[in-house]
Amino acid sequence: MAWMLRWLPGLQTLLHYQRNWWARDAMAGLALSAVLVPVGMGYAQASGLPAIYGLYASIVPLLVYALVGPSRILVLGPDSTLAAVIAAVIAPMALGDAARAAELAALLAVLAGGFSLLIGLARLGLLADLLSKPIRIGFLNAIALTVLVGQTPKLLGLQLHTEGLARQTLEIVTQVLAGQGNMVALALGGGSLAAILVLRRSHPRWPVMLVCVVLATALSAALNLHQTVGLRVLGPLPQGLPSPGLPGVGWQDAVHLLPAALLIALLTFADTSVLSRALAVRGGYQVNPNQEVIALGLSNLATGLFQGFPVSASSSRTPVAEAAGARTQLCGVFGALTIAALLLWAPSLLRDLPIAVLGAVVMAACLSLADFRGMAALYRLRKAEFGYALASFLGVAFVGAIEGIAISVGLALLALVWNAWHPHYTTLVRVDGTKGYHDIHRHPEGRHVPGLVLFRWDEQLFFANAEVFHQQALLAAQNAPTPTRRLVVVADAITDVDVTAADALLHLHEELVRYGIELWFAGLKGPVKDRLRHYGTLETLGEHIFSATAGYAVNQYRQTYKVDWKDWDES
């Protein structure tokens, strides 16, 4: 029973459920459904799918996560971050076939769920760390721009026949200059977008999206705008709930979708873990990140098996549930049941909903993704990290979401290797009036202990930087202001030494011996010494060459060699 409660937190919630929570969860669920319906349909269309699949993808993950999710009020569902990724992957494969696009999207959800389960069960959550802050900022800005451009034709009443950000932008401009478009669509969509953006700031608790959807749908139906002015509307939704089944696509399609599924698994885990931890801190409870990603994987897996598409935690809908007073995951269950009731008994209610208004809903959500201030801050704080963000932005926007992320992650890993290959190193000197030993480049006025060189190396020692270490340590000994008797490697930052680097130490020792110089170490960690001992390196270097700190190394040197040296703090 204990293991069941651990892996099915929803059962534990039911066992300890308080009666006074019921009304709050029910009202919060109704408020949540008012946002889930328009947003779910809008994100489905932004993903290149019919709107009905957005409702399917809103029902299933809420029910599954309520049972297996560790967070109390986290809301899962279609997400603007994923919409452009899904559309970019499935559109070229579906070739305009809506049924095939739905099957591919469902398979993508199943594969992403499988990757999430693998990450959670193997405790590989650190893979999400590859998506660093600069890469995520660039990615989100590119996704926001891509989705905004993709939704603009809906707002203007245009029909596009091209793919890709640049080509779509050119076609929009060409059609607008040619006088094409629908002014009614622009009025309804533009008005809805303006209302959502303004009222979201001034009255954040108002269900602005729902109000815009209801008013626009009522106006469209009353004036029969679809027939009279050619306004594109949603049309009737299929009645009933999604049926379970395996996506009917082949193995070649599955293989083609694997990179996108892995990217989605990493993106959803990164988003969900951040939001889940924030909710746990506010709620005074703890969540297991591995359990969180497993719950996310099961939710995506179930969503794909019930005609949905990949979902993630929502940073916009979760606050709706929280502000409405939700206490547990039953809030999500009530929200899911409300959508299910709509599909069972009133699917025709939304048949006259203007597509332009759905586009406005998606555009409003995507504008909250954009973080151009973050890009500017990166440029001001650190140009290299701005470069990663820019590479991510340009790659995702103009090459593709998966390719862009791969390029930017590759650049970041190359930079990591380069920095480890060419780490910081310096010679340490004594500065009068200041404790310790300090970088000579920052303190050129510092004094050298005669005959002693303190050479600090600020990185692990491995095959890529072993030769650099060898050369620079030798130069430090040769360029000292007085003839060197002992070179002390200040090794506090050295966390590992591989076999190649151990050989480099032996070669350095041999060269120093030829010059009559001793090789010592200060601050070298015990595990690193054990490794050198295991390699047999200490059989040549000796066991007596270690000092606890640079200060002790200086004192040991002065005990061995009587040098003309008086420290500033010696009376």
Image (cartoon, rainbow, N blue to C red):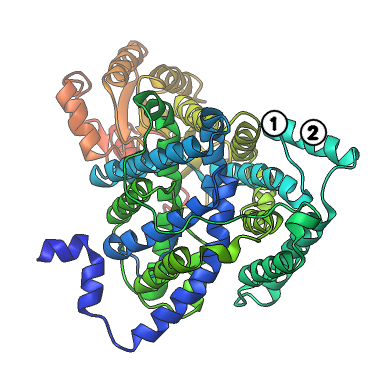
Residue 522: assigned label: none
Q: Is residue 267 above or below residue 228?
A: above
The kind of residue on which mark 2 rests is Leu
Residue position marked by numbered label 1 in the rendering: 162
Q: Secondary structure at mark 1?
A: loop
Viewer-nearest residue: 283 or 486:
283
For the C terminus, the quadrant is bottom left
- Which image quadrant for residue 56? bottom left
Residue 482 location (% of width, % of height): 48, 25
Residue position marked by numbered label 2 in the rendering: 170
The kind of residue on which mark 1 rests is Thr
Residue density around tag 1, few if under 14, some if 14–19, many if 20 or more, within 10 Å = few
At x 41%, y 60%, the residue is 59
Q: Is residue 521 above or below residue 515?
A: below
Camera-nearest label, 2 or 1: 1
For the N terminus, the quadrant is bottom left
Q: Confirm whether residue 478 shows in the render.
A: yes
Residue 173 location (% of width, % of height): 83, 38
At x 48%, y 57%, the residue is 55
Q: Report the side of 11 relative to 476 (left or right).
A: left
Q: Earlier in the sequence, mark 2 or mark 1?
A: 1
Viewer-nearest residue: 502 or 332:
332
